[in-house]
Image (cartoon, coloured by chain):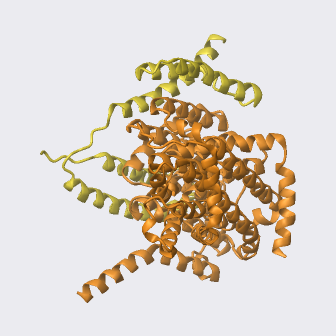
Chain colours: A orange, B yellow
Amino acid sequence: MFLWDAIKGMTVGFSYILDPTTILLIFGSVILGSFLGAVPGLGSKIGLTILIPFTGKLAPYVALAMYLSVSEASSFGDTIPAVLFKVPGTEGAAATAIDGYALTQKGKAGYALGAASMASLVGGLLGIVVSIIFIPFLADYVLLFGPPEFFWMAIIGISIIALVSQGAMAKGLLSGLVGILISFIGTDIVTGKDRFTFGSIYLSDGINFIPAMLGLFAVAEMIKLSTKKTSMEMVGKVTSNREIWEGCLAVFKYPINVIRSTLIGILVGAIPGTGKSVASFLAYLFAVRSSKHPETFGKGEVEGVIAPECANNACSGGGGALIPTLTLGIPGSSGMALILVGMTFLGIRSGPQFIIYHADMMYAMFAGLIVGMIFAFALNFLCIKPISKAVQVPNEILIPVVLVFAFLGSYALRGSVFDMLITLIFGILGYFMDKYGYSTICMVLAMILGPMAGESFFQAWKMGNKSLTVFFTRPVSIGLIVFLIIVMVGPALYKKIKHLRTTSGK
Amino acid sequence: MREKIEIGEFILLGVMLSFVFLFLYDIRVLPLEGKFLSYLLAPFIVLCAGICLRDAWIRAKKTKEEKALKWPFFVTIGGGFFLFFSIYFMGFYLGSGLFLLLWFLVFKKITRATVTLIIALPLLLYLSFEVFLDMGLPKGVFWAWLLG
């Protein structure tokens, strides 16, 4: 039943996507994603940050397909510096660098890159298939949610990202809570009155999350990049396309490794707040443990490239991480938090309403992603040599170009010069937040979920005759509170128990 | 070695905490429903900030040497402000072009490729957004004043 619905939906989805302009836009997103994924320190986060403000005039399904294509193409591109320089383009390629670079040192760079590209394609496609089948199935259950539950979902979303982001949990929560307060600036949608504007006409429209996001990610990252040197030395070269092709074929020699790693990627991605680095290292670990020759890992074993790449792509993009993002509105990873930003920008609220009432848009998004993945694979296959050269673009050239794009994106949103200033201020704030381990992604996510939390809070409060008990008495709400407590307190409690056991053992 | 305390994190926490006090202070917000949730969140913010302050203080005592910010850091932030003001006064096309030119001059990166970039990038963006996509770009107050 679900399978048949999925097939029908995908047919409709492809009919939307297979249009020359859409294909061209997806191809452009793939180039952007591949390039930014390949440049260490940039990644899909910057790509999406720059892209989102320019997609306001596009059809939502085209924009969504573009966002996911950037995210997925970045997972393809990030393997290039990991394999050639042992510098992972993003955190997801860190595990790939172990055996990928070892293969490069043996003179098999093309072989490693070919295997990584094909593993990414297979893992990514299998991840999409699982998402297509499971997302509509899960949506039926999410219909049980009302305003109190949506309030808790917003709090859970922010808390989970705070928990897994860099630095201590208190820092992540602080960033998130301050983000919620910032989102309250402007006209209150419930009372219709100005709130926290201090009489400023600029603030009466509120601080939009797009200029803030451009500052916190793009500008802050450029300030950070300005303090770093990027003189990477390439030890290996890609000699021929035949070598790459042999690497591609090598993936099919290890079907069990591919399936296992893909499933790990999907499962890890489906747990909100985890991420592709966890998935890729876990898949690598399982590949080592189940191998007949575990001693070869770390010394140039192709299975050590295939496993993390399959898991990485099955987790991100259209894979496991998309499941909680689309069904619950909780980002499966920090990358998915930006997809949520994009959806909010397009006026789409993720959750069961999106899946039920905009199913055609969802399937078109998946179809676009499949097209994007095929493009990303082809680009990686045909353009490995130019991309590996592009990785070495000096920071002095990259920084001003990204700054110009960030300012343009900020202005393009509402045609307000004030937004450019917001971008700059948040850029400086973001740099220091990043420096001292305060999560910037948490702040942006809170700026998006904040209004939703505020609105749901007010509705639930009214629903419960201006009593807060409504938040603690409904069965689904209780389940969500228990889940929140387990997630927040569980890891610390587990550590404490483990510590007590070891001390009592001694 | 003289012990120094890195004050950056304290300033950052001060900025974050100031939001709470500014928001609670803003008594113009009426009715109360509009900031009820802010009041509920404020104690949690103060609690988290307190924990972070304590950690920062403990870490600051252990810090032996303060890491100085390098000059490209100030150049980038200064460049950001320059870009903002030049776009504000001269409009996007001239402002971004001037910013790119000065940037490459400061970093001594004037080559054939960068000169092409200085001319082509603003032009390309101007044509793409202003002409083809019909998305208005900043015109600049100087031109607005000059043209009446």
Q: Nearer the viewer, residue A39 or A305?
A: A305
Q: Quadrant of residue B144?
A: top right
Residue A207 in the image, given as x and y percentages of width and height: 57, 45
> How many discs mark residues in the rendered view?
0
Residue at left 65%, top 58%?
A249
Residue A74 in the image, given as x and y percentages of width and height: 59, 49
Q: Looking at the image, is A386 positioned above or below residue A457?
A: above
Q: Quadrant of residue A121?
A: bottom right
Quadrant of the snapshot with the N terminus of chain A: bottom right
Is A476 left, or right, of A65 in this rendering? left
Residue at left 84%, top 54%?
A14
Q: Nearer the viewer, residue A20 or A485?
A: A20
Q: Nearer the viewer, residue A228 or A203?
A: A228
Report the residue that reaches farthest toward the bottom.
A505
Is A190 left, or right, of A105 in this rendering? right
Residue B42 in the image, given as x and y percentages of width and height: 45, 61
Residue A150 in the image, given as x and y percentages of width and height: 64, 68
Asked if one can make out residue A197 in the rendered structure from this viewpoint, the answer is: no
Quadrant of the snapshot with the C terminus of chain A: bottom left
Residue at left 53%, top 66%?
A279
Q: Nearer the viewer, residue B47 or B6?
A: B6
Is A466 left, or right, of B75 in this rendering? right
